[in-house]
Amino acid sequence: MKSMEDSNRLLRIAAWIWLGFLFGMGLLDFTLYTPQVQMLFLQSRPPGGLPAPLAPLPLLPVYTYYLINGALALLFHFFANWAWVQKKLGKIFYPLMVLAISAGPIMLNVLFAPRFPQGPLSNAEGMALRQIPILLVALVLVAWEYRLWHVIVFSAAITLLELWLIGYASVFEYRNLVVFVFIGLIRMISFIAVGIFLNILVVQLRQQQKDLQQANTDLTHYASTLEHLAVSRERNRLARELHDTLAHSLTAISVSLETARAYFDVDVDKSRDLLDKSLLATRTGVDETRRALRALRSSSLEDLGLGLAIRKLAESAAQRAGLQLDILLDQDAPSLSPDVEQAIYRIAQEALQNVANHAGAKSVILRLTYQPKVMLAIQDDGVGFEPGSLEKTGHYGLLGMHERARLVGGSLLVESTKGHGTRLVLTI
């Protein structure tokens, strides 16, 4: 779809070109003709007397030509900037402007240029040179707004109009009319060739604009899709963080409180000790949840680094569950991105929490190595489970670990047999 604003902007540019061309040609004409007029003025002076009057004045046609042509160019400029006229005339506004910038100069050129004083630009070639630049501007206007056959019709029409005016006005008796015919035909052929080229460029430009708009639309849709995907990933990450912090704390507190209630009538001291542990776990869970919601990154990682944070995590889980711990951490740790460190830490936390709460194990083995790949291995001798038995139980620990591994470009292998323990291997 053609943009009316682009067309009007092109008309305003054409108006400035027309005015600038008239100013330049006027300077050239008056520079050429003024010395010639002065020479005629001196030749008309009788010896020892006043000069005879020059009738008609030689420069009168030049003044008249530029006065009328300039007025027409100013009117063209005025209407090109008058939005009310553009709105009032509607679709016929643009054709009328093209007619004004093409037919107006041709008519003025035929009527006044032959009456210019004899000079370099008063012959047939000079007349053609006076109007070719403006007619080229009109050709651009036609090629911009209309189709290829309009360009061809326009090129032929301005040539026929000029030849008809030349024959109708009959002001070229002293010139060779055949010269004008050849000049008109050459100009017509040239305008058709240039017009075809301009029209092809305009068509390609509009196609590129259309493709660019489509690409912009596709990019907008792609950005929207990425935004929804990022929101979805962030929701999943928040769910994992809350599971790794709040859910674990609440689970531990629930187990401790249930045990305290069971011991309440049997062993008051044991119940009181379990209540104290529950309060401590509550405070720890609240602090951990706040840290997770504030930074979504383990404070232990920030304070201790990955190796020491995992060691502290494993020792705490082993002490809490009464497990025998066998841990080996590679000391030659490379520089890992925060996302990778966070994933390793949270997967280790989830795995150790499962061992402490559900495995019923007596020992746990943890290995963290970095060569040739980053590998975290955790193995226990607990009760194990059947693969697929946790899919419909509502527990999201294993699912969260798999998601964390995929997000950092890793893989998670979980091997377990009921009654023979569980082995978890994270490879990045």
Image (spheres, rainbow, N blue to C red):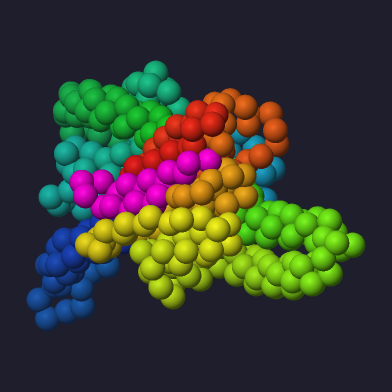
Residue at image coords 51%, 55%: 323
Q: Quadrant of the C terminus?
A: top left
Residue with the most extreme top position: 149
Report the magenta stretch's main SS: strand
Seen from the viewer's position, the closer of residues 201 and 37 is 201
Q: Magenta segment, which residues? A: 365-382
Q: Position of residue 203 (x, y in %)?
A: 38, 28
Q: Is residue 373 left or right of residue 357?
A: left
Seen from the viewer's position, the closer of residues 427 and 19 is 427
The relative height of residue 92 versus residue 271 in the rendered view (above or below) is above
Residue at image coords 27%, 40%: 132
To which quarter of the image does residue 304 belong?
bottom left
- Is residue 121 visible to the viewer in this orientation of the structure? yes
Instruction: Count the numbered circles shown.
Output: 0
Residue 370 lies within the magenta run: yes
Residue at image coords 81%, 55%: 258
Seen from the viewer's position, the closer of residues 299 and 424 is 424
Residue at image coords 63%, 41%: 396
Q: Is residue 99 left or right of residue 233?
A: left
